[in-house]
Structure formats: structure tokens, C-alpha cells
Image (cartoon, helix red, strand yellow):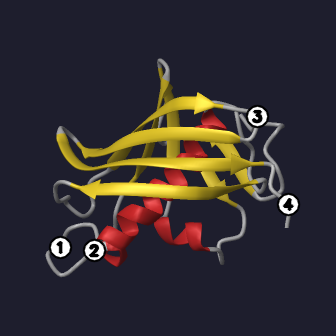
């Protein structure tokens, strides 16, 4: 089922391959977010779960997810979660800050999930935090602020 409110930059559709999850995808695969691969979201009460599966291209020399790839995922998770809460649509916001603490290592090829919380929404700001996990292992914690409705 396609979401009629998805804008020209992103699609946001149910994924039959992952029942209960929606695929949040940039339509232009030449942009940075495409490097992350498939991103999926779903509601879990007040939280949103954001999922990706790290591939070899996301790995470091220890065969774990590279910190830069995790940071990119955390940043994308802010926007994917905001879309899932229906408080933001693509193309009209920027990340103001992102603070991360790396805690554990991951296994390439196994899904990682950002468990997201919306702490506060004001007229133009979203304050969020999340934990990135692989199964029960915490990989990182992070918080970020997104400013809505910016102009070029």
C-alpha cells in the first residue's frame, strides 16, 4: 500500500518481504542515503524502530559496522522515525546536532535496529534519542535535534 502523502524525494510503503515494516527509501539512488541500503520502520507503541542490514561496504577492518556508517544510519534514523510518527516529511528539515556514544560491535549481514524516542516536538524542532541494537547487544546510543521547515 503506497502512502499518498509521500513526497517526490522519498517513498514510504509497506514491504511485503518484511510484514509489519514500511520501507523508507530515497527515490534518487545517487544521494548519500542510498549508501545505507534498505531502511525500514515500524511503530512500537510510542517508539519507532528503524532497521537496516549492514553489508561489507559498511564494514571496518574488524568486520564490524564502521562508525561512520553507524553515524550515517543514526542521522537517517532521525528522519525515518520522524516520518513514521508523521511529524515530518522529506526535504524540509536539517539535522542541527547528533551526539553518539559507541558501545559495542556488530556482525555484518545481521539487521541492526535503532529504537527511537521523540522527546519533544516544538513548532520547528524535534528532539529525539535512540539506541542502536543488534539483537540484545547495544551498539550505540545517540541523541539528535532536527529543525523543520527550513529554506534553501
Mark toward the viewer: 1 or 4: 4
Q: Marks 3 and 2, Cα distance to the nearest angstrom? A: 38 Å
Q: Marks 4 and 3, Cα distance to the nearest angstrom? A: 15 Å
Pointer 4 or 2: first along the chain: 2
Residue 121: which numbered mark, if any? Answer: none
**Quick check: 66 above or below 87?**
below
Mark toward the viewer: 4 or 2: 4
In the picture as drawn, the residue positioned furthest to the bottom comes out as 61
**x then y, percent, for residue 19:** 48, 32
Q: Quadrant of the C terminus?
A: bottom right
Check disc 4 and report the residue beneath it: 151
- Callout 2–callout 1 Cβ contact below 8 Å: yes
Task: Report which quarter residue 110 is drawn in.
Answer: bottom left
**x then y, percent, for residue 9:** 77, 59
Q: Is residue 70 left or right of residue 137?
A: right
Q: Marks 1 and 4, Cα distance to the nearest angstrom? A: 40 Å
The one nearer the camera, 82 or 144, is 144
Amino acid at each position: 500500500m503506497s502512502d499518498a502523502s509521500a513526497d517526490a524525494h522519498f517513498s514510504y510503503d509497506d514491504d511485503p518481504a518484511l510484514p509489519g515494516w514500511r520501507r523508507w527509501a530515497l527515490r534518487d539512488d545517487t544521494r548519500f542515503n542510498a549508501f545505507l541500503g534498505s531502511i525500514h520502520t515500524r511503530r512500537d507503541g510510542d517508539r519507532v524502530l528503524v532497521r537496516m542490514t549492514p553489508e561489507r561496504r559498511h564494514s571496518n577492518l574488524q568486520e564490524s559496522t564502521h562508525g561512520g556508517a553507524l553515524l550515517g544510519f543514526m542521522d537517517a534514523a532521525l528522519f525515518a522515525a520522524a516520518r513514521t510518527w508523521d511529524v515530518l516529511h522529506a526535504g524540509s528539515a536539517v539535522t542541527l546536532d547528533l551526539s553518539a556514544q559507541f558501545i559495542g560491535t556488530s556482525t555484518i549481514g545481521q539487521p541492526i535496529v535503532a529504537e527511537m524516542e521523540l522527546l519533544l516536538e516544538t513548532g520547528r524542532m524535534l528532539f529525539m534519542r535512540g539506541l542502536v541494537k543488534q539483537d540484545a547487544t547495544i551498539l550505540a546510543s545517540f541523541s539528535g535535534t532536527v529543525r523543520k521547515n527550513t529554506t534553501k
